[in-house]
């Protein structure tokens, strides 16, 4: 027994020596009347081992906002294991207090309550070595535990009881309500759902473990299992290691919808397969989230118009198809938008045929966005049907059965996987195909000059042709008028003929000007071919209204 106090003493000394943080009080229970404020984020309440801390953490995204949290104190990344739900941003000047009448209150600067666990008459609070923050009654039994009010993470020894759930965060650094939940349902099933933000509306389940479960355990041996009524267990995730004393552990419903179990070597050095100073994933559910679903409602695992793939380290990657870009690159789950004006339903079919084309997608599909199906049909017919249909954003063709599905925007449940076994034809503006531009101003400038140079060459040919045509046309018209020999207003019949001809002439001039404008598009791929120019001039094909030629250049120079 004699060694125990001296051990404590030594540890406290070590802590004081190696850190300037005011931790001296950390080994005691948190007594009534204690408080923490955001103005002093270096003060927090520690667990006896010093491995966990409770207090305010400045947000990575906004250092003037804070998160009330329990975190792994001894690791560099200070990974957050718990925070109160529902999430509310905590601004500077907020405080958390264990009041003299035994209530834990999170209050903002003005004193209004942001969160409280709904317990009064606690005798003290304590952060246990397991990472469980408790409010205890006078007899020492817990009246409230953070373990029973979890956020997105479970720690060893934590139990998820029936009717309780983990809820993912929105992004890695945004702790607000996310898009996925792991629910220990009262029917005994453990289920992963996508949820509609903002609300708790559940979309379809994308993974489940069914069969008379009672609760979800994370035990000290590194196994997360579902305990069943008949005293048998179903392993959900396991660390598959005999000794875990040298590792920190957690199991988190990550913001991408995957429930992952992680370990982190406590030693500074790595250990065999495990990387030092990093959470190493040891198991996950579901193993292939992109193949789960499809969801009847909502966008699926990734956002609308994007598709889901998994990287080698099993993280979910949401990608945009060609000529689509992220609505918000820092929040990819919001989905993708077309980078081109989508097909107008006012334009005629030949116009669509000239302005739109397809990018072929292999092994990518968006199940459930269909509105039309043809079978049997050839691949060429499938493309043609989509091209001339202004509602069609994508045609998917299954060669074996000769089936063609037309799909509309927004596309949902997108996934890329080798077992998709279909060809997708994504409708894009072919005449606005532009390469991705480097964002550095210098390169942009260079590119602009190269473009301008090459444009001028190509343009001059086209313009020359139109100029010749115009001159020829006007001289022809002039000759015709000369032969009429009379001022147009002198006779009513003649005047009528003149108006008709004038209108016709004006239409032709309009056509010439439009073609000329198409010819001087800065982006070479937008300029029509000589053959097309000839067709446009003689009226065989319609001439769409050309885009403003200066907008392209100005977008480059921005
Ligand atoms: C915390 O307080 C309780 C009740 O007063 C007491 O039983 C326990 O020993 C205290 N723990 C520590 C570490 O001081
Ligand atoms: C649950 O247990 C009951 C009997 O206790 C059994 O009839 C039923 O099939 C079980 N359900 C599942 C999903 O295993
Ligand atoms: C326990 O229950 C599950 C499902 O409810 C069943 O599949 C399993 O066979 C049962 N095991 C025993 C030992 O009764
Ligand atoms: C943890 O759970 C597994 C599987 O149920 C069991 O084999 C093991 O003994 C448990 N370990 C502890 C420390 O409870
Ligand atoms: C769960 O995992 C543990 C450790 O790997 C293993 O001993 C046990 O047999 C597993 N239980 C089941 C039901 O698979
Ligand atoms: C950590 O270090 C201790 C002593 O330095 C050693 O005994 C232990 O095996 C190490 N653990 C790991 C996981 O490397
Ligand atoms: C997994 O890989 C992706 C890219 O392939 C990377 O962005 C991400 O940081 C990696 N995650 C981990 C935990 O290593």
Image (cartoon, rainbow, N blue to C red):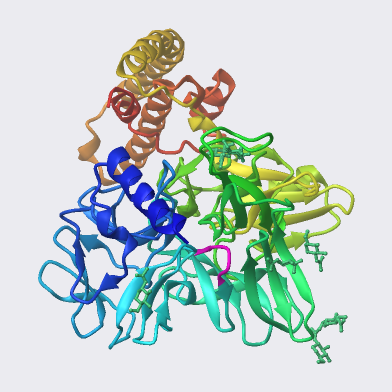
Q: Is residue 217 or residue 16 the one in the foreground?
A: 16
Image point 77% across, 49% down: which residue?
420
- The image quadrant that residue 512 belongs to is top left
Picture coordinates of residue 318 (x, y %)?
A: 56, 46
Relative height, residue 429 to residue 196 (above, below): above
User: Does residue 387 appear in the picture of this structure?
Assistant: no
Image point 56% across, 49% down: which residue?
306
Which image quarter is the C terminus in?
top left
Picture coordinates of residue 57 (x, y %)?
A: 30, 54
Q: Is residue 333 or residue 497 the one in the foreground?
A: 333
Picture coordinates of residue 508 (x, y %)?
A: 40, 32
Q: Quadrant of ligand 3?
A: bottom right
Picture coordinates of residue 487 (x, y %)?
A: 22, 31
Report the side of 266 relative to 482 (left or right): right
Residue 156 within the segment the image draws in magenta: yes
Image point 36% across, 42% down: which residue?
500
Most frequent secondary structure within the magenta stretch: loop
What residue span does the magenta drawing correspond to? 153-158
Image point 15% across, 55% down: which residue?
39
Report the side of 388 relative to 383 (left or right): left
């Amino acid at each position: 027994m004699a060694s125990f106090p001296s051990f404590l003493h030594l540890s406290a000394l070590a802590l004081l020596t190696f850190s300037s943080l005011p931790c001296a009080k950390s080994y005691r229970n948190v007594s009534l009347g204690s408080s923490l404020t955001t103005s002093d984020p270096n003060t927090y309440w520690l667990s006896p081992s010093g491995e966990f801390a409770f207090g305010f953490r400045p947000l990575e995204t906004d250092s003037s906002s804070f998160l009330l949290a329990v975190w792994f104190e001894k690791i560099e990344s200070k990974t957050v294991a718990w925070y109160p739900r529902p999430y509310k941003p905590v601004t500077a000047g907020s405080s958390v207090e264990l009041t003299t009448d035994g209530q834990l209150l999170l209050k903002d600067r003005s004193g209004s309550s942001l969160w409280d666990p709904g317990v009064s008459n606690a005798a003290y609070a304590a952060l246990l070595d397991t990472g469980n923050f408790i409010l205890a009654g006078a007899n020492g039994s817990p009246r409230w535990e953070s373990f029973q009010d979890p956020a997105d993470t479970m720690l060893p020894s934590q139990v998820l009881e029936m009717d309780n759930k983990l809820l993912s965060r929105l992004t890695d650094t945004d702790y607000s309500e996310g898009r996925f939940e792991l629910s220990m349902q009262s029917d005994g099933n453990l289920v992963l759902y996508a949820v509609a933000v903002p609300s708790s509306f559940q979309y379809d389940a994308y993974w489940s473990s069914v069969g008379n479960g009672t609760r979800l355990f994370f035990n000290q041996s590194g196994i997360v299992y579902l305990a069943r009524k008949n005293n048998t267990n179903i392993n959900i995730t396991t660390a598959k290691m005999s000794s875990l004393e040298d590792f920190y552990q957690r199991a988190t419903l990550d913001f991408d919808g995957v429930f992952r179990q992680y370990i982190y070597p406590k030693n500074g050095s790595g250990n065999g397969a495990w990387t030092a100073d990093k959470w190493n994933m040891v198991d996950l559910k579901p193993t292939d989230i992109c193949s789960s679903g499809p969801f009847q409602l909502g966008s699926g695992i990734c956002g609308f118009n994007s598709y889901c793939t998994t990287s080698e380290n099993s993280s979910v990657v949401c990608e945009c198809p060609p000529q689509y870009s992220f609505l918000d690159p820092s929040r990819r789950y919001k989905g993708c938008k077309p980078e081109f004006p989508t097909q107008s339903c006012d334009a005629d079919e030949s116009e669509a045929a000239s302005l739109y084309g397809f990018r072929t997608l292999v092994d990518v599909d968006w199940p459930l966005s269909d509105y039309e199906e043809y079978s049997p049909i050839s691949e060429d017919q499938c493309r043609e049907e989509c091209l001339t249909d202004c509602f069609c954003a994508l045609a998917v063709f299954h060669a074996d059965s000769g089936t063609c599905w037309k799909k509309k925007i927004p596309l949902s449940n997108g996934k890329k996987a080798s077992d998709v076994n279909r060809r997708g034809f994504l409708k894009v503006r072919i005449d606005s195909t532009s390469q991705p531009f480097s964002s550095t101003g210098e390169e942009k400038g260079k590119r602009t000059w190269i473009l301008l140079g090459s444009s001028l060459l190509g343009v001059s040919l086209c313009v020359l042709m139109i100029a010749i045509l115009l001159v020829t046309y006007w001289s022809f018209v002039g000759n015709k008028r000369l032969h009429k020999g009379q001022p147009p207003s002198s006779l009513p019949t003649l005047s009528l003929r003149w108006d008709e001809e004038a209108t016709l002439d004006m239409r032709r001039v309009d056509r010439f000007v439009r073609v000329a404008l198409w010819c001087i598009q800065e982006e070479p791929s937008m300029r029509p071919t000589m053959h097309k120019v000839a067709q446009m001039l003689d009226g065989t094909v319609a001439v769409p209204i050309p885009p403003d030629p200066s907008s392209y250049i100005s977008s480059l120079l921005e």
